Image (spheres, rainbow, N blue to C red):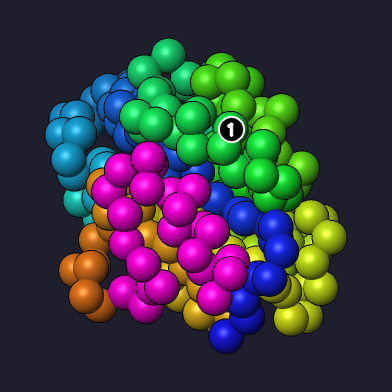
């Protein structure tokens, strides 16, 4: 397992880690369902579908509503037109700007590796005012592979100056997609426990778990110096 001896790249997942975006995703899903005469889904249900990108989200919506799977392509296209500007209900988790500010001041190069497509990713990073903090942003449609494939995370570390083949780096995320991805690179994984994971905490490979961003700079520091 790689460790960092100096400020090393720290890459973050986005949905369920830095931002609570489920209310916007839920609103977009239900707008498309309503447009097609289908009953809306609850917020908790839609939240549990997030993490693997837009196609998996819609496969899960289709399975939950009994829609004909042949409609997926059109539903996703309609969803995307809304998703590109869906920022109004999204919030940073408490303590995120402060924690990112501390890490930036300490010299950690920071990036994003998300399964969210680049359009909505850039829109929401601008909306919540943290876009300038990241030297690399890899979205769900930036490469052929998505998390849990390690390729996007390796690319994010590489863009921040780490050796993409054997990065000294840290990944911070909320889900099974992130835990599996970090283990595949491999890099230490810090799990935010208040996000959108479906698995039990104890089933996820991780270096540490946190539920408050005030604890993150210290955790990063301890992993980096290990
Ligand atoms: O859009 C998704 O399904 C998940 O996005 P995330 O990788 O930032 O959690
Ligand atoms: Mg996530």
Residue 51 in sight here? no
Question: What residue is at 72 percent from the left and 74 percent from the top?
Answer: 167
Residue 138 horizontal side relative to residue 203, left or right: right
**Can you give x and y, in whole percent of width and height, for residue 126 in the image?**
63, 21
**Image quarter (top left, top right, bottom left or bottom right) of the N terminus:** bottom right
The answer to whether residue 48 is above or below residue 204 is above
Q: Residue at x 54, y 59 (%)?
A: 221
Residue displayed at 67% across by 37% down: 105
User: Please, which residue is most extreme toward the bottom here?
Assistant: 1
| Disc 1 packing (10 Å; few <14; some 14–19; many ≥20) | some
Question: Is residue 134 at all visible to an observer of this figure?
Answer: yes
In the rendered image, residue 70 lying in the magenta stretch gets the answer: no
Q: Is residue 184 above or below residue 92?
A: below
Could you say where residue 44 lies in the image, as x and y percent from the top left? 17, 40
Q: Is residue 208 magenta?
A: yes
As rendered, which of 85 and 159 lies closer to the eye? 159
Magenta span = 204-226
Give the x, y percent position of residue 207. 41, 73
Q: Determine the residue positioned at 57% across, 37% down.
A: 102
Q: How many marks?
A: 1
Question: Which quadrant is the C terminus positioned in?
Answer: bottom right
Q: Would you name the residue on which mark 1 appears?
A: 101
SS for tag 1? helix
């Amino acid at each position: 397992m790689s460790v960092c001896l100096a400020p090393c790249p720290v890459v973050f997942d986005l949905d369920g880690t830095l931002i609570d975006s489920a209310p916007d995703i839920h609103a977009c899903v239900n707008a498309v369902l309503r447009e097609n005469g289908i009953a809306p889904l609850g917020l908790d249900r839609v939240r549990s579908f997030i993490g693997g990108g837009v196609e998996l989200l819609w496969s899960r919506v289709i399975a939950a509503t009994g829609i004909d799977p042949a409609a997926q392509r059109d539903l996703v296209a309609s969803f995307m037109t809304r998703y590109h500007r869906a920022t109004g209900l999204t919030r940073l988790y408490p303590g995120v700007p402060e924690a990112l500010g501390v890490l930036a001041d300490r010299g950690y190069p920071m990036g994003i590796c998300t399964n969210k497509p680049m359009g909505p990713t850039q829109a929401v990073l601008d909306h919540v005012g943290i876009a300038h903090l990241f030297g690399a942003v890899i979205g769900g449609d930036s490469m052929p592979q998505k998390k849990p494939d390690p390729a996007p995370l390796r690319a994010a570390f590489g863009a921040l100056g780490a050796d993409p083949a054997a990065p000294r780096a840290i990944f911070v995320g909320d889900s099974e997609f992130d835990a599996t991805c970090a283990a595949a690179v491999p890099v230490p994984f810090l799990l935010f426990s208040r996000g959108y994971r479906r698995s039990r905490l104890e089933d996820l490979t991780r270096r540490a778990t946190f539920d408050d961003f005030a604890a993150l700079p210290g955790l990063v520091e301890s992993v980096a110096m290990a």
